[in-house]
Amino acid sequence: MNDAEKGQLQAAIVPVTPFQQNCLLLWDSVSKRGAVFDPGGDVEAIVDAIAQTGIKVEAIYLTHGHIDHAGGAEELKAALGVEIIGPHKADKPLLQGIEKQAQMFGVAGGYRNAAPDRWLDEGDSVDIAGHKFEIFHCPGHAPGHVVFFNREARFAHVGDVLFNGSVGRTDLPGGDHAALIASITNKLLPLGDDVSFICGHGPGSTFGRERATNPFLNGAG
Ligand SMILES: [Zn+2]
Ligand SMILES: [Zn+2]
């Protein structure tokens, strides 16, 4: 696509599942082409939001394999006829165990195991309507967690790695607190204090604000 057709990235959040997970719609303001990140469930609400924005969804991306992020991916794929891309293949066991996660958390709602069409890895990049997103493999909250970064717009989707005032929990299977803090301090914070992010739960923030005030980072980086 040429630059004349390229506009700004626009975002909308659809809170899904009993975990109030931030399902993210991301699209280009001019072409209206875009993607859905982390359709954890409540797929009807996601399909409604897509219709309201009038965007054409070209892919489904997953940050990691937890039920609240990936539990509706196969249903949305069937509804839209697009591929599921990501996370890192280290989350394959989690994605194959989504129905078990539903039992473990005691939630009902048609959650299905997910089988991505393509895995992502450190150093990969994906193109969303002409906007390049670099992929960072950030284990700790989940072994195969990936973060999406758009250098031009200074924007990242960090999933459950980092939150406004907190970090991802590491008490679930495959969790590793030291690895999580290393992912944040070695891979995310160096991208720059001015980078704003959306996360999997609650309001977003900037890397600079979290570097300065997040009690779990404590002067890191
Ligand atoms: Zn998670
Ligand atoms: Zn989550």
Image (cartoon, rainbow, N blue to C red):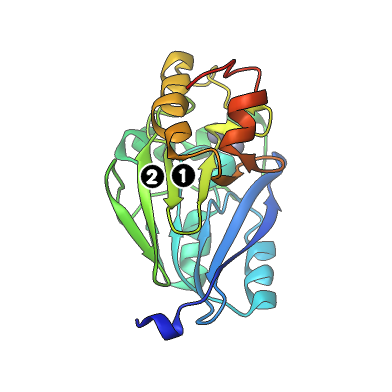
The residue under label 2 is which amino acid type?
Answer: Pro
Vertical position of residue 76 compared to residue 220: above or below: below
The residue under label 1 is which amino acid type?
Answer: Thr
Q: Nearer the viewer, residue 6 or 122?
A: 6
CB within 8 Å, label 2 to label 1: yes
Q: Residue 26: x, y in percent?
A: 55, 63
Q: Is disc 1's CB within 8 Å of ligand 1?
A: no
- Determine which quarter of the picture holds residue 44: bottom right
Indicate the secondary structure of the residue bearing disc 2: loop
Indicate the secondary structure of the residue bearing disc 1: loop
Task: Find the distance from the CA under tag 2 to the CA under tag 1.
Answer: 5 Å
- Determine which quarter of the picture holds residue 5: bottom left
Q: Nearer the viewer, residue 190 or 93?
A: 190
Q: Residue 183: x, y in percent?
A: 42, 27
Vertical position of residue 137 compared to residue 168: above or below: below
Vertical position of residue 141 compared to residue 150: above or below: above
Q: Residue 17: x, y in percent?
A: 68, 46
Task: Provide the residue designation for mark 2.
Answer: 87
Residue 145 visible somewhere in the drawing = yes
Task: Name the residue rendered at 30%, 39% in the picture.
Answer: 89
Q: Residue 182: x, y in percent?
A: 42, 21
Task: Name the residue rendered at 55%, 17% in the picture.
Answer: 171
Mark positioned earlier in the residue sequence (2 or 1): 1
Q: Nearer the viewer, residue 41 or 52?
A: 52
Task: Name the residue rendered at 44%, 39% in the picture.
Answer: 191
Task: Name the residue rendered at 55%, 35% in the picture.
Answer: 160
Task: Provide the residue designation for mark 1.
Answer: 63
Q: Quadrant of ligand 1?
A: top right
